[in-house]
Image (cartoon, rainbow, N blue to C red):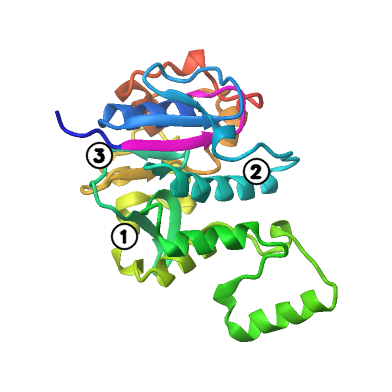
Amino acid sequence: MAHRMRVASLWLGDRLSFIEQVVLQSWVDHGHDVQLYAYGDVAGVPGAVDLVSAADILPPRDLPDAHDAAIFTDIFRLTLLAQADVTWFDMRALCVAPLPADDVLFGLSAPDVVSPLVLRVPGDLSALAEALEFLNADPPIMPWRGPRFVRRMEEQIAAGETWTLKDLREGATGTMLLTHMMISANLLQRGLPTERIAPVSEAASGLFWTTLVPLDRIEPKGTLTVALPDAARSVIETTFCGLPPKTSYLDAICRRHGINPVAAPVTALAA
């Protein structure tokens, strides 16, 4: 029997909507062993998905807002990759083809910009350890800003100033750090092009809930994953009463993967 790749993600809520269910089931249906890390019970997890204690990887923290949750997810992602032999996938990354069994796997969201959608690196990668040092530093200094910036930050620390990850620019703990990590490891050239991991941009997100959109507009040949848009949850909840419009792409993928949206509509509780 062929080896089944183990993939994993994190959910910080206590129930799933059909959007998260179809993402998880898509990875199962393409032959991967799927783990969902969480801090407690989660309602609506597909039967073939293993629910795993996130506290075994990283102790829980108080996450008062979405910004805190995003930073925490960034920290969890790299901590998990350092501790477990898994491939990370974001909870909006729909799998449309089996992933290649490469030791390093990631995609680019723009030229020379690493996407956090899908990520696999060796757990002993020195650049991964350095990235975790940055995430756990007090205060953190962004090394990719260059030696002059680092010296200035060190002078500010010596003068008694301090800051946290929340004070850094948006993306510092995600795409910026991942890009720096891959550049440091001389791996950036191995990144998959955007059209293979996220062929539809956020600007064209309406394609996902528009009816009768040709499938190849969203899943062109060679696509491995599709990034469901950040806006999908709020649009489906507020405009379509929590359910995918009939004959839309979201409706089609639910039918493809055997997910019943009526049993798990998008609501404010599924977060």
| Residue kind at label 3, given as amino acid type | Ala
> Which of the pair 18/144 is nearer the observer?
144
> Along the line of sight, which residue is nearer the eye, 62 or 43?
62
Whichever of labels 1 and 3 marks the residue nearer the N terminus, that label is 3
* Image position, residue 187 (x, y; %): 34, 67
Picture quarter with the C terminus: top right
Which region shows up in magenta?
6-18
Return the residue found at the far top.
263
Disc 1/disc 3 C-alpha distance (Å)? 15 Å
The CA distance from mark 2 to mark 3 is 29 Å
In the rendered image, residue 126, in percent from the top left (x then y), is placed at 43, 63
Kindly identify which residue carries mark 3: 97
Q: Tell me if 205 is positioned left or right of 157 in this view.
A: left
Q: Of the numbered discs in the image, which one, if any, rests on residue 259?
A: none
Residues marked 1 and 3 touching at CB (< 8 Å): no
Q: Which of 23 and 136 is in front in this view?
A: 136
Q: Residue at 58%, 73% (x, y): give it.
A: 143
For numbered disc 2, what is the local secondary structure?
A: helix
Tell me the element at label 3: loop
Reading the chain from its start, which is encountered first: label 2 or label 1? 2
Crowding around mark 1 (Cα neighbors within 10 Å: few <14, some 14 to 19, many 20+) is some
Which residue matches tag 2? Answer: 69
Q: Position of residue 208 (x, y in %)?
A: 42, 38
Instruction: Count all numbered tags in the image, as a single digit.
Output: 3
Q: Check whether the beta carbons of the residues at disc 2 and disc 1 lie within 8 A of each other.
A: no
